[in-house]
């Protein structure tokens, strides 16, 4: 599962998550890590685009809290990539920061959360690209470890995410 901040202008126009420049960065990062975007469930902390594409306010995050919890419960991901500060704080707690949370897997129920910078930030701060690549590679390693450990039936046997098949 990949959790971003909120829909941007391109997402709002198309109704699809992670399109435009950030979506292209995301697709490239996933491919480099050996992950298939079509097998990832893509969502955002806030479900509606904030005015002027600003960061979501805490009240907006709170209004969507239950909806994200329901998505996580239904998808039952093994690994969640939390992209950007809103997703990291929502999943790891209000005192969590991307810079200090990245680089390891954090337990959340039966899955691990990997915090990293949002792919949109790579267009503004190119120096973070290697860090983000490392975080995506970590998510892939954790996913592989959990798959090996479970060696059982798939957690989600059928279904469609917003963009494709769920990872089983």
Image: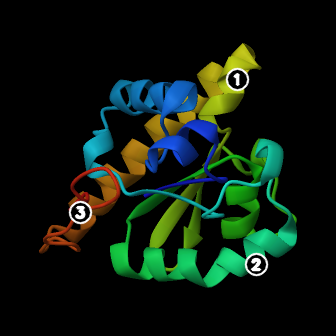
Question: Where is 132 relative to 110, above or below?
Answer: above
Secondary structure of the residue carrying tag 2 is helix
Looking at the image, which residue sits at the far top? 126
Pick the residue in front: 83 or 20.
20
Label 3 near label 2: C-beta < 8 Å? no
Viewer-side residue, 36 vs 16: 16
- Label located before the other in sequence (3 or 1): 1
Point out residue 162 in the picture as x, y percentages from the top left corner. Answer: 35, 57
- What residue would you read off at disc 1? 128
State left or right for residue 98 relative to residue 83.
right
Q: Residues within 10 Å of mark 3 (few under 14, many from 20)?
A: some
Q: CA distance from mark 3 to mark 1?
A: 32 Å
Check disc 2 and report the residue beneath it: 62
| Residue at (48, 35) in percent of width and height | 19
Q: Estimate the spatial distance between the alpha carbons at disc 2 and disc 3, rounded to whole Å.
A: 26 Å
Query: Nearer the viewer's eye, disc 3 or disc 1?
Result: 3
Name the image quarter holding residue 64: bottom right
Residue for point 67% across, 58% down = 87
Q: Report x, y in % for residue 111.
A: 46, 69
Q: Could you say which disc has been placed on residue 160 in the image?
A: 3
Tag 1: Cα neighbours inside 10 Å, few (<14), some, or many (≥20)? some
- Residue at the front extreme? 13
Q: Earlier in the sequence, mark 2 or mark 1?
A: 2
On the picture, is 80 further left or further right than 61?
left
The residues tagged by marks 2 and 1 sit, at their Cα atoms, a distance apart of: 29 Å
């Amino acid at each position: 599962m990949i959790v971003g901040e909120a829909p941007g202008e391109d997402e709002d126009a198309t109704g699809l998550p992670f399109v435009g420049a950030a979506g292209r960065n995301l697709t490239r990062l996933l491919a480099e890590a050996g992950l298939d975007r079509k097998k990832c469930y893509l969502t955002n902390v806030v479900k509606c685009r904030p005015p002027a594409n600003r960061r979501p306010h805490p009240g907006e995050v709170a209004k969507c809290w239950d909806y994200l919890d329901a998505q996580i419960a239904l998808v039952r991901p093994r690994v969640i990539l939390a992209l950007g500060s809103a997703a990291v704080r929502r999943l790891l707690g209000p005192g969590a920061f991307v810079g200090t949370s990245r680089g390891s897997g954090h337990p959340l129920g039966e899955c691990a959360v990997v915090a990293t910078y949002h792919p949109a930030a790579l267009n503004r701060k190119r120096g973070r690209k290697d860090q983000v690549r490392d975080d995506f590679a970590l998510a892939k390693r954790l996913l592989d470890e959990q798959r090996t450990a479970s060696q059982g039936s798939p957690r989600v046997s059928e279904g469609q995410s917003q963009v494709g098949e769920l990872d089983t």
